[in-house]
Image (tube, rainbow, N blue to C red):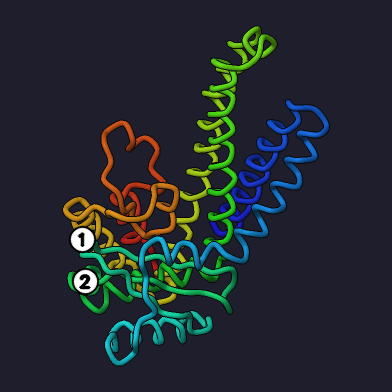
Amino acid sequence: MTIKNQLKTVVLLSVLTALLLWIGSLFGKAGFYFAIVFVGLMNFGSYWFSDKIVLWMYKAKEAKQSEYSKLYKIIKEVSNLSGLPMPKVYVIPTEQSNAFATGRSPNHAAVAATEGIMKILTEEELKGVIAHEFAHIKNRDILISTVAGTIAGVISYIGNMFMWSAMFGDDDNRGNVFGLLFLAIITPIVASIIQLAISRSREYLADETGAKFVSNGNHLADALEKIEKNVAAHPMRMGTQATSHLFISPPFRRGAFLSLFLTHPSTKSRAERLRNMKF
């Protein structure tokens, strides 16, 4: 399972990057070279600064051990069980029950938990959630998904440029209006599908790895079911959909159509897999 998911991630990221380079090549050699430079700059920025940006977006504050002793105790315990360094600990000021991990490596990682999650989960359930986030840190999922999200976002933006060019561009562009509109529609969709495929595969792997850290899948399964109900009652009111994949459960309210483009597998399928695990 682990090797399969790792290989799938490499392939999908490669396709996503290739898609951006192909779009650049449509503008000639200059566009192709610009796309190469742009991909490099995006990857550099994602590597060094994505964690700080995401924590700022959700108003996360570094937690004081004296104030959040229970959370620190659980994180230290999972740190020992996983063999990973102790990450920085952040708290997000919202009643929603959720959590995410960020950082470029196990030695430069942070775990952020909402105030809400500490209110509704038992200690064992919260430990399962924290173990899931440690799994993301160990597998370097946050760096991979952030780079994928950045590139996918840029491709979607370029798709919008194609659309405006088709409608208001010069005579040459208007002569190829159907081709431009096709690109405007298809490029963001392809980019989103690839991004979602990466994210969903990583969630299954993190569930499995985290459950192995604590030798129990039932507690995380119970936590996921509680979190899903809580999120429905307390949708996130800060941040952006582009970062939804970072959380253990999608944090925003969604309609029936948007459910087709979820960044996570269904809670039901995740819980079934966890409860069927053998230790």
Name which residue lies at 32% across and 69% down: 92
Which element type, helix, strand or loop, lies under badge 2? loop
Q: Which mark is residue 121?
A: 2
The number of numbered badges drawn on the structure is 2
* Labels 2 and 1 touching (C-beta < 8 A): yes
Cα gap from disc 2 to disc 1, whole angstroms:
8 Å
Relative to 232, residue 72 above or below? below
Is 171 rendered above or below residue 254?
A: above
* Residue 10 appears left or right of 30: left
Give the vertical position of 204 relative to 25 (above or below).
Answer: below
Tell me the number on the disc at residue 226.
Answer: 1
Residue reaching furthest to the top = 175
In percent of width and height, residue 178 lies at 58, 11
Give the image location of residue 159, x and y in percent.
56, 29
> In which quadrant of the rendered image does the C terminus lie?
bottom left
Query: Where does the N terminus fall, quadrant-wise?
Result: bottom right
On screen, residue 189 versus residue 233, left or right, reads right
Q: Amino acid at mark 2?
A: Leu
Tell me which amino acid carries mark 1: Lys
Image: 95 above or below 11: below
Residue 49 percent coordinates (x, y): 57, 65
> Which of the pair 276/218 is nearer the observer?
218
Q: How would you rate the neighbour count of disc 2 (Cα within 10 Å): few for under 14, some for 14-19, many for 20 or more?
A: some
